[in-house]
Amino acid sequence: MPSTNPLDYLPLWALLGLFTLAVLLFLEAGFRLGKRRWKATEGESAGPLGTIVGSTLGLLAFMLAFSFSLTASRFEARRQMVVEEANSIGTTYLRAGLLPAATASEVRELLKEYVDSRLEVTQTGDVDLALKRANELHLKLWRAAESVGKSQSDSIVVGLFIESLNETIDIHAKRVLVGLQSRMPMVLWLALFCLTAFSMLGVGYHEAIAKSTRSPATLLFVLGFLTVLALVLDLDRPIGGYLRVNQEAMVNLKSMIEELPGTGQLGERGEDS
């Protein structure tokens, strides 16, 4: 089962809306606090305060860069896992042709269904159903491998098939780990939120102390920050985001399986593989 992330309970657009509202509220709160402070003291200098606010913004920029790097590397890892899994399934499919005809046909039909379920989850987003179906297919495939392995225990080609099938099952576990369970820790999200709150309060407070009106440049700063934050949120979300892992390797594998004999064309083209 994939790990539950509290941020996954809301769609991406709702999360961005909440973050936008929070940023604007923190800016306004800082500005009003600064106005009140300036009226009460009329002596606080904006110079040292600007240095402090700049340092806080620097910390926020560092945290954003770290978070973006972390989520982008994991996004790339998910993409690589798709390629590795497609290669492994393809190898298993081809090696299944070395098995006895009845077992080869059964295994290839199961592998075809396995690929279809992989592509289906990217469209439906039903991860729980996809994992359950994958486990069922793994069990059926392994039973077929056990059967042929016991009857031909000394066969090298059977050993090669079992090796590739085992690798396919192992890659599935790795893909679940990388794609669904390796997420940005909540403690980092909390740290990012706290730094955002401190930075926006500081920016608003500095504007008020400097006797400045609300500058349009502040809006540009907020939009830039929210753009990067949106990318981090999207990259960290394996299902339901706008940035999707390219499934071309799996689509090409499906096309290859449909062209090769063994799945519905076995009787027409024979065991040429």
Image (cartoon, helix red, strand yellow):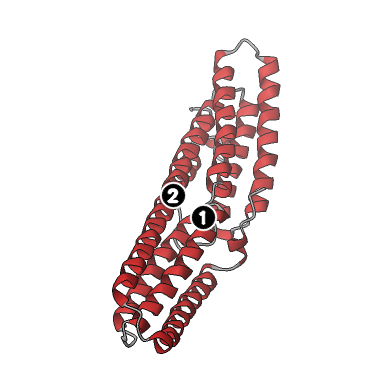
Question: Disc 1 vs disc 2: Cβ atoms closer than 8 Å?
Answer: yes
Of 3 and 22, the residue lying toward us: 22
- Horizontal and vertical percent position of residue 191: 51, 59
1 or 2: mark nearer the eye: 1
Q: Earlier in the sequence, mark 1 or mark 2?
A: 2
**Residue at the spot x=70%, y=40% of the render?**
136
User: To which residue does mark 1 refer?
Assistant: 188
**Residue at the spot x=50%, y=38% of the render?**
85
**Residue at the spot x=66%, y=39% of the render?**
137
The image quarter in which residue 264 lies: top right
What's under tag 1, amino acid-wise?
Leu
User: To which residue does mark 2 refer?
Assistant: 70
Helix, strand or loop at mark 1: helix
Label 1: few (<14), some or many (≥20) within 10 Å?
Answer: few
- Horizontal and vertical percent position of residue 143: 71, 29
| Alpha carbon distance from label 1 to label 2 | 11 Å
- Is 41 displayed left or right of 46 in the figure? right
Label 2: few (<14), some or many (≥20) within 10 Å?
Answer: some
- Horizontal and vertical percent position of residue 62: 37, 56
Of 124 and 200, the residue lying toward us: 200
Q: Is residue 92 above or below residue 131?
A: above
Q: Is residue 266 above or below residue 25?
A: above
- Horizontal and vertical percent position of residue 114: 59, 42
Find the residue positioned furthest to the top: 154
The image quarter in which residue 134 lies: top right
Q: Which mark is residue 126?
A: none
